Image (spheres, rainbow, N blue to C red):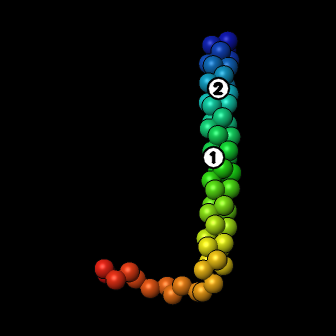
Amino acid sequence: MNEELDALEIKVSYLELKFDELNEVIVEQQKDMKKMKAQIEALEKKVLDLEEESGQDRPNRKPPHY
């Protein structure tokens, strides 16, 4: 009985360690996603600003080399 309890405690300790490691990965990914979202929003704003500056709608067509 004692050996079974020890084995379960070892498994739980291992799972807790893995849980903490995975949680750290998720937190880092969330930070990265937030940063990328901000970059995308900034790029979208730049594109809109450039379109407004040009004063004309650019046609959505392929470049001449196609």
- Residue drawn at point x = 54 percent, y = 85 percent: 58
Q: Is residue 58 above or below residue 35?
A: below
Residue type at tag 2: Leu
- 31 or 4: nearer the eye? 31
- 5 or 65: nearer the eye? 65
Specify few, some or many for label 2: CA neighbours under 10 Å numbering under 14, 14-19, or 20 or more.
Answer: few
Residue type at tag 1: Asp
Q: Secondary structure at mark 2?
A: helix
Examine the image and state in which quarter residue 57 appears: bottom right
In the image, residue 39 lies at what x, y percent? 63, 56
Q: Is residue 62 above or below residue 23?
A: below
Q: CA distance from mark 2 to mark 1?
A: 23 Å
In the image, residue 41 lies at what x, y percent? 67, 62
- 45 or 52: nearer the eye? 52
Any part of residue 27 in sight: yes
The circle on residue 32 is: 1
**Image quadrant where one finds the N terminus:** top right
- Mark 2 or mark 1: name the one nearer the start of the chain: 2
- Residue drawn at point x = 31 percent, y = 79 percent: 65
Q: Is residue 36 above or below residue 26?
A: below
Any part of residue 8 in sight: no
Specify few, some or many for label 1: CA neighbours under 10 Å numbering under 14, 14-19, or 20 or more.
Answer: few
Q: Nearer the viewer, mark 2 or mark 1?
A: 1
- Residue drawn at point x = 31 percent, y = 81 percent: 66
Residue that label 2 marks: 17
Examine the image and state in which quarter residue 54 appears: bottom right
Farthest residue toward the top? 2
Q: Secondary structure at mark 1?
A: helix
